[in-house]
Image (tube, grey):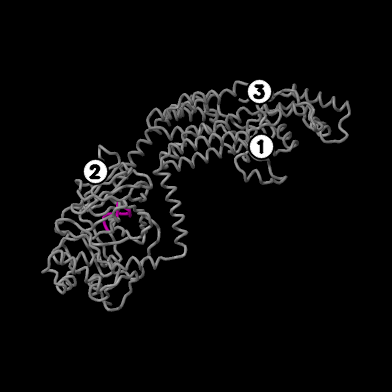
Amino acid sequence: MSMNSETRKAPRLLLGAALLFWGLETRHWYLAAVMAVVMEASGFFTRRWEFSAADFNRLWDATAIVCTAGVFYSFLSGRVDNGVIGFVKWFPLIFLPFTVAQSCAARNVVTLTTFSWLLRKRKPSAAEPPPSSLTFDFFYLAICLMAASAANVRNAAFYAGFCVIAGWALFPSRNRAISRPAWGLCLAVVIPLGYGGQIVLHALQAIVENKTGNLFSDMDMADLQRWQSRTSIGSIGELKFSDRVVLRVRSNGRNAPPDHLRESTFNTYESSARNSRWLVSARNFHSIASDPERANSWNFIAKKDADTSISIAAWLHYGTGVLALPTGAWRVERLPVTVLSRSGFGIVRVEGGPELVHYTVRYGPGESMDAPPDDHDLQIPEGERPGIEKVASELGLPGQSPEQNLETITKFFQAKFTYTRYLKDDGSDAWGKSSPVSHFLERSRSGHCEYFATATVLLLRAAGIHARYATGYSVQENGGKGLYIVRSRHAHAWCLAHVGGAWRDVDTTPASWADEEASANSTPWRPIADFFSAIWYKFSEWRWLGEKEGFNRVVTVLLLVAVAALAWKYFPRHKGWFFKSKLDEPPSASSHPGSDSEFYLVEKHLAAQDLGRSPEETLRHWLRRVEASPRMIAAAPPLEPILSLHCRYRFDPKGLTEGDRQSLRELSRSWIEGSRPVKKG
């Protein structure tokens, strides 16, 4: 928005009306009324403040600092929707001092350099035109409307108020070739069309979302992982894991934490030569009501006699995620979420929580929230059946009890198999005649946890035992003082077997896998990464979980002190800034010669008529612009003789003779009295 001497200001009372509209939408109309009076009061007084360009720079810097600090603090104090956007509602109050200062200034426009430190430090060349001037009025109008929009409930009253303010602002800038009735008629037609258009667009959006929701649902990877687990069985190469901390588990001091924390369970296996995956046969999430006697607590099943508890700190992506829980969990406490639902396969999903949650889990042996076994838990894919039944027969599984089956399979894997992250093609099955699991059981006998878990599930099913495939994390790294660290590389897969009337964890992966993973991921940078991870965790713990009432009081006091310090540092305190009249007498003589020149009366007279000089504009360039302005009548006397006498009086060591000094006085006063700018029309 490039501005010159014809810079348009906001119409009288428009900004006050915009503030009242903001106050009604945010329910702060008492404050808005006071702000509106302050904003519009300057228009009823003829005296002005003598702000310099440096004063405006300081005031804008203070405003920008307060605004940036507020946005940052709002971001730290809550989510974007109720933190930062909530702070946007207060923008009219933050930008009010700068806008009022501009409207009360003798030269009530600012340059682009006011808003940029880089432009201030840049030295323009002599050939460059002076920086463009502008008024902040319409920017402030946009700020008020934006703040009101952040608080509205999208009703017809808001739309009507918005249109009234917008029409009021646009009316002075209308094309003068169009009559006022015609312009008003066009506006009256556009307003209902716009309102109806946004209703239609909203309805179309709902239709599109409804029609395409199912089409693209599988593209949500977070949701996809709840229902299917694409394994690395059959893939060639090395599995890559990271040392990123994903969970922090703290035991109650009397018992060690569980070995496994489960996120998902699967009961249907599909495989091919180079691709395999586990699926869930039924997506049956059900919302659970929270405990009415204790906030942020949920019961999955009835209370157990053997009760053990652990505390888990976990991250949620935008407040949504799947909880990691031990098998046999019956209650979760201190979980600040709005919705909790679970499936029959032990998957617990939460929504409406903070980015970091710290919850307590109570668990014990016996009954679990997993659905009872069914036929899916005995199925073996046709491609895997020959190899699985062969190994099961060799181990004598069909004739053993369930407990013996578990012991036999565990000893079989521990004694004859090895753990490896690196999978290679040994060429023994170049034509892909055997499945990856059969190849693992009969030939390679080396693989990662997905091989062991899948093979265990299928062998147990071959023995007539209902079994499922479970994924989650292994709890193994002791951080001291009851704290256990769970990293991304601790992601694990194991078997869930239904034995003795209850589901239980069965992990046949050789115990050496944990040491091999730790050794493979050992780097000299791990302590440094853990240090910064701990700092970020403590910061997030304060941000999302800490007691903030006391902190908010401290921050409020600090902000008030900072604002007072900024005001003291940046508020103008030079002599002669307060309440200078538009056509007052020139300042009294000071230390430099020529300070009492009557030319300053001419300069103030032009400034009062919105023809003031920009800070970077030379005197001669400014006067040529003034004389060329269509707002000055052709009969206005020339300014060059006055400027010539002023420059001699101001800079010539010899000064002026008494006659020349008298000429400067008379020419200046006669020019002020004889020149009359053309009124705006």
Location of residue 90 in the rendering, given as x and y in whole percent from the top left corner: 48, 33
From mark 2 to mark 1, how far is it between C-alphas?
Answer: 62 Å
Q: Is residue 224 magenta?
A: yes
Please tell me whether mark 2 sits on a helix, a strand or a loop: loop
Q: Nearer the viewer, residue 178 or 192?
A: 192
Three-letter residue code for mark 1: Ala
Three-letter residue code for mark 2: Ile
Three-letter residue code for mark 3: Arg
Location of residue 361 in the rendering, given as x and y in whole percent from the top left corner: 28, 49
Q: Which residues are magenta?
A: 217-228
The tag on residue 499 is none
- Which is closer to the viewer, label 1 or label 3? 1
* Marked residue nearer the N-terminal end (1 or 3): 3
Badge 2 is on which residue?
A: 288
Badge 3 is on which residue?
A: 47
Q: Is residue 602 magenta?
A: no
Within-10-Å neighbours for mark 1: few <14, some 14–19, many 20+: some
Outermost residue to the front = 254
Badge 1 is on which residue?
A: 54
* Marked residue nearer the N-terminal end (2 or 1): 1
Q: Is residue 509 left or right of residue 87?
A: left
Location of residue 472 in the rendering, given as x and y in whole percent from the top left corner: 29, 57
Q: Is residue 221 left or right of residue 382?
A: right
Q: Nearer the viewer, residue 322 or 418?
A: 418
Q: Are marks 2 and 3 in contact (CB under 8 Å)?
A: no
Q: Are marks 2 and 1 in contact (CB under 8 Å)?
A: no
Location of residue 669 in the rendering, given as x and y in whole percent from the top left corner: 78, 23
Q: Quadrant of the N terminus?
A: top right
Please tell me whether mark 3 sits on a helix, a strand or a loop: loop
- Which is closer to the viewer, label 2 or label 3? 2
Q: Main secondary structure of the magenta part?
A: helix
